[in-house]
Image: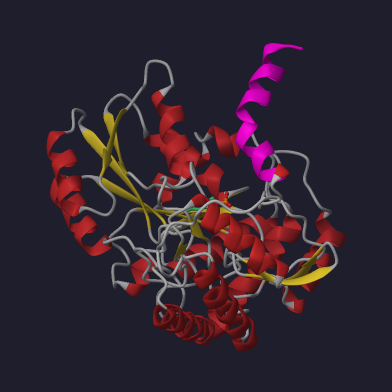
Amino acid sequence: MSWIHDKAHAELARIREAKDKQVYPYFRPFESGGLHTTIAGKPIVNFSSNDYLGLTNHPKVKEAAKKAIDTFACGLSSSRVQATTTAHVELEERLAKWFGFPKCLLFTTGYQAMVGTIMSYADKDTTLVLDNLAHACILDGTFLAAGTPASQPEVRFFNHNSVRSLERVLSTKQREHALVLIEGIYSLDGDKARIREIVEVCERYGAVLLLDDAHGTGTLGTNGRGLLEEQGLEGRVPIVVSTFSKTFGGIGGILLGDEEVVDHVKHRARSFLFSASLPVPIVAAASTILTMLEDDGPALVSELHDKASYFRGRLTEIGFDLGKSDTHIMPVMCKDERKALFMHVALLENGVMMVPITYPGVKKGEERLRVNITRGHTRQDMDQALELLALYGDAFFVLSGEELGPLEE
Ligand SMILES: Cc1ncc(COP(=O)(O)O)c(C=O)c1O
C-alpha cells in the first residue's frame, strides 16, 4: 500500500462512519432528470435543485438539444480556439444584448469562467478583495493566481457583506489596482449582496467590481436579468459572471463585460483556451430558455417569487430559522450535524429531498438543509414538504433548539 492509500483511508474516516450509520447523504443517483424524479425506484421531489425556473425539463428545451445533436453531435473535440460554432457566437450575441453588456463570452462551466477571469486580471499590481463567504470558484481562481510565479497578487478578505470591512481593506491595500469579488445571492445562505453600497465604495476607491450572479440570473429583477436589474444598477458593474447550471438548465459559464475586457479574457484565460468547448446541444437548450426569458421573463420570475414567498411565510410560521436568507434560497438551519443528517434521511424516506450541508461546507454549528424553492414546485409539493418539516423539525429538536441526546443503537 502506498501513502496515497493511507491518506485516502485516514481522510475518509468521517465518510465511512456516515455510511455505516446509513446517513451518508450525497451522490444519490437520480433515475431521471427534473425536480420530480426517483431514487432507487422511489418518487422524490427535489428541493435542493438550482433549476430555479423549472425549465430544464421543458419539452421545447429538450427538443432543441436533440435537434442540435443532428447538426453538431454531442461534442466538438477541441477548445473554442478551433471549435467555435455559429451557435456559440449567436448565443453570445443574444446574451450580451439581453443582459445589456457590449460583449459576452461562453465558457464550458461557470467555475471556469470565474477562474479564467480572475487569472486574466490578477498580477503583482493587483489586490484581490474577496467576501469571506465567496464561492469556491472565486477562492480557487484567487489561489491559483496567488500561486502563479512572478505575478502573485495580494489577497485580502472582507467580512461577509460588510461595506465597512470592504472599505477598510480598500483603504489599506498594498497594490495599485483592486478587483473586488462578490456573489449576487450567496448560494448557501440565500442572502443578497449589499450591492448598492458595494458599488459606491468600489467607485470611490477606483476598484473594479466583479459580480458572480449565478443565483441571481433568472431569479432577480423584473425580467430575471439579475441583481443589477433588481437594484437599478445596470451599467455600474464592469464585469459579471454567471452560469447555465441554474436557471439555464444545463451547464456553461457566462462572462459579460465590454469588448476589450472580454476579449482580453478570451485570449488569456487558460480555463477557456485549454478546455473543450461547450457542446452545442447545451448551447441550443440555453438558447431556448433565453427565448422564454425574452418572451415571458416577468411572468416566469413572478411565479417563482410567489411560490418562494408562500414557502418562506409558512416556514417562518412553523418557527424555522432561515439564517440570513432573503431570497428563494432558504436554508433550514439545524445547527447540529446529526440533526441535519437525521432530518435529511427522514424527509427522503417520505419522498422529499433536502440535502444537508455540514462542516466543512459550513462552519460547525451552522449545519443546515439546503432548500431552494423553484418555479417548478407545485403547491402540493410545498405543502407536503412543510408538513414533514414541521413533524421532523419537532421530533429532532430543530424547532426547539434542545440538544439531541444519545440515540438508542
Ligand atoms: C455562486 C456560484 N458561482 C459559480 C458557480 C459555478 O457554476 P458552474 O456550475 O457553471 O460551474 C456556482 C455553482 O455551484 C455558484 O453557486
Across the whole image, how many numbered discs are drawn on residues?
0
Magenta: main secondary structure: helix
Quick check: 305 above or below 6? Answer: below
Q: Is residue 309 magenta?
A: no
Quick check: 217 above or below 292? Answer: above
Q: In x, y percent, where is residue 271? A: 57, 36
- Left or right side of 249 for 201: left
Colour scheme of this structure image?
Answer: secondary structure
Is residue 203 in view? no
Q: In x, y percent, where is residue 357? A: 53, 53
Quadrant of the rendered structure where residue 352 is? bottom right
Q: Residue at x 63, y 53 (%)?
A: 408
Q: What residue span does the magenta drawing correspond to?
A: 1-19
Q: Foreground: 348 or 381? A: 348
Quadrant of the rendered structure where residue 142 is? top left
- Left or right side of 216 for 205: left
Q: Residue most toward the top?
A: 2
Q: Residue at x 45, y 78 (%)?
A: 315
Q: Residue at x 83, y 67 (%)?
A: 67
Q: In x, y percent, where is residue 38? A: 79, 68
- Left or right side of 313 for 52: right
- Left or right side of 322 for 179: left
Quadrant of the snapshot with the N terminus = top right
Q: In x, y percent, where is residue 295? A: 56, 84
Quadrant of the rendered structure where residue 389 is? bottom right
Q: Is residue 18 magenta?
A: yes
Q: Foreground: 29 or 302? A: 29
